[in-house]
Image (cartoon, rainbow, N blue to C red):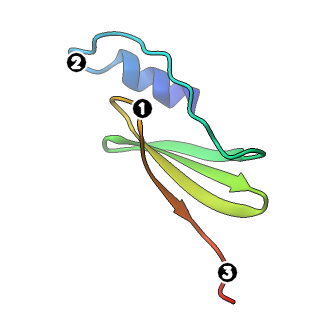
């Protein structure tokens, strides 16, 4: 994940420079995967055995959305 963030921060044309950003994840979350898709940074998490996908704007690194998966009752 850090590689993707660093790449996007330093390789954007006209980029003002590096920014320090702390993404707050759910307590106990484990990062399973991270990728850049278009203008989004996509992070797949394992949160207590449940899968969540968090997206961030690749330019500002602000949260853009969250998708939670659950089982049918």
> Is residue 67 shown above or below 41?
below
Secondary structure beneath dot 2 equals loop
Dot 2, crowdedness within 10 Å: few (<14), some or many (≥20)?
A: few
Secondary structure beneath dot 1 equals loop
Image x and y of residue 19, in percent: 43, 15
- Which residue appears at 64% of the width and 74% of the height? 70
Query: Residue reaching furthest bottom?
Result: 73
Residue 8 occupies which quadrant of the picture?
Answer: top left
Is 37 situated left or right of 52 in this image?
left
Say the numbered circle drawn on residue 71. 3
Is 37 situated left or right of 54 in this image?
left
- In space, the residues marked 2 and 3 are separated at their CA atoms by 43 Å
- In space, the residues marked 1 and 2 are separated at their CA atoms by 16 Å
Task: Say which residue label 2 marks.
Answer: 13
State yes or no: discs 1 and 3 in contact (Cβ < 8 Å).
Answer: no
- The quadrant of the image that shows the C terminus is bottom right
Task: Say which residue label 1 marks.
Answer: 61
> Is residue 2 shown above or below 42?
above
């Amino acid at each position: 994940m850090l590689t993707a963030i660093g790449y996007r921060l330093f390789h954007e044309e006209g980029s003002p420079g590096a920014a320090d950003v702390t993404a707050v994840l759910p307590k106990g979350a484990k990062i399973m995967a991270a990728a850049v898709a278009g203008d989004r940074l996509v992070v797949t998490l394992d949160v207590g055995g449940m899968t969540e996908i968090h997206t961030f704007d690749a330019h500002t690194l602000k949260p853009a959305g969250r998708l939670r998966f659950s089982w049918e009752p």
